[in-house]
Amino acid sequence: MVAKAIDFYLPDQLNASRPPEKRGIRRDHVRMMVLDRATGKTKHDCFFHLPQYLQPGDLIILNNSRTIPAVLQAEWFRNKVQLRTKTEIRLARRRGDDIWEALIVENLVKKGDHFIFSPELSATVVGVKKNSPLNILEFTKTGSDLLNIIYKIGEPVRYEYIDQPWELDYYQTVFASHPGSVEMPSAGRAFSWELLFTLMRSGIGVDFIQLHTGLSYLLDDRWHQSPEENEEEYHISEKTMQRILETKAAGKRVIAVGTTVVRALESAAKLNNLSGITNLYINHQFSLKIADGIITGLHEPKASHLDMLSAFIPEKLLLRAYDQAIESNYLWHEFGDMNLII
C-alpha cells in the first residue's frame, strides 16, 4: 500500500530550530491546539493546561523509549586498506544485541567492509539490503556494553531545520528509561514531572509502553520509506494492557502520546501480541481499536504521520486545523508546539 500524501504549505519560519528551553520557556509551556474529533472545532491553549481537557478515569499512555546518539563517525577499511579517515554512519534500527541496520553515508559500501569507531569498538558489514541504502552491521560489542560506547561517542540525529547541534538531553523525554530510539519519540517531550503528577492528582491515569523509533529519513528523497518498510520494535507489559482494557471497559478514554504509541497499541490489538516488530500502516481506512485520542506534535507536509491522524479525524477537518495553526504561528517538529485530538 502506498501512503497517501496529505500536502500543505509550511513556511520555513515555523520550523522550530531550538528547544523551548532555549527560547525562554519551560518544556511544558509550549502551545497546544485542541482539536475536537467530532466537530473539527479548535481551541488554543498552553500544554500545561492539558488536565483541563481530560476526565478522571482517562488513561494517558507514553512511550518511555530513550533516544540514543545514533550518528557515529568511523574510519573505513576494506581488506585492511583504509579508504576514509572519517565516514558518517547513522544507526537505523536494532536487529539484535550486536546487529544494527545502518545508513553508511558513502557510495559503494561492500559486504566485509570494516569500520573502526574507537579503540574499543568496530563493526563489519555483514549484509547489504536490496533496494535500500541501508546496510547490516555486526558490532564487536553487545547489549549494554555496545550502548554505553554509543552514548560516549555518538551524536543525536539532527535534520536541516535544526540549525546547530544540541546536547542529547534536549532529545530526551523526562521519563525516558529504555534505550533504543534512533529519533526522539517527540510527542512526550512537552511533559514535565510536575505535569504528570498534576494529571495523576486529577484522577487521570499515566502508564508506559516502549516503541523504539527507527531512522525516518535516509538523506536522499529517492529512498523514501513507506510505513510498511519502517519496521519498529515494541513492547507492552501485560499489566499495562490490562489497565488499558479496564479503562475502555469503564467507558473512559485511552489517550496515546504520539504516533509511536498509537502504532504499538494498535499493533498489539491487530497482531494479538504484546511484543514484537511492527510495520503497521494506519490511515483514514483504519478502524482504531484502542486509541481514543492522541497527543502529538505538528507534522510536516506529506508525512505518513498525517495519514495516521486521519484515522482520528477526517482529513478535511485536519487540514483546516493545520491552516489555523499556520496562521497562528504554531511551531513544527520535535522542538515545536503540541496538538491534542480528542
Image (cartoon, rainbow, N blue to C red):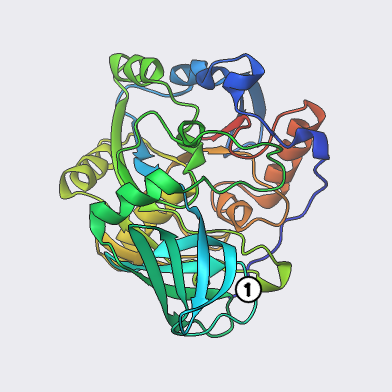
On screen, residue 332 versus residue 251, left or right, reads: right
Of residue 244 and residue 186, the one placed in the foreground of this image is 186
Residue at figure coordinates x 58%, y 49% from the top left: 309
Q: Is residue 263 above or below residue 222?
A: above
Residue at figure coordinates x 73%, y 37% from the top left: 15
| Residue 14 in sight here | yes
| Residue 289 in sight here | no
Dot 1: element: loop
Q: Which residue corresponds to mark 1?
A: 2
- Residue type (three-letter) at the residue carrying disc 1: Val
Q: Is residue 218 above or below residue 183?
A: below
Of residue 285 and residue 9, the one placed in the foreground of this image is 9
On screen, residue 326 versus residue 77, left or right, reads: right
- Residue 303, how many percent across, how many down? 65, 55
- Residue 326, how many percent across, how many down? 78, 34
Quarter of the image for the N terminus: give it: bottom right
Q: Quadrant of residue 243?
A: top left
- Residue 231, how many percent across, how many down? 44, 67
User: Mark 1 packing: few (<14 Cα in 10 Å), some, or many (20+)?
Assistant: few
Residue at figure coordinates x 71%, y 73% from the top left: 222
On screen, residue 93 versus residue 177, left or right, reads: right
Residue at figure coordinates x 22%, y 43% from the top left: 240
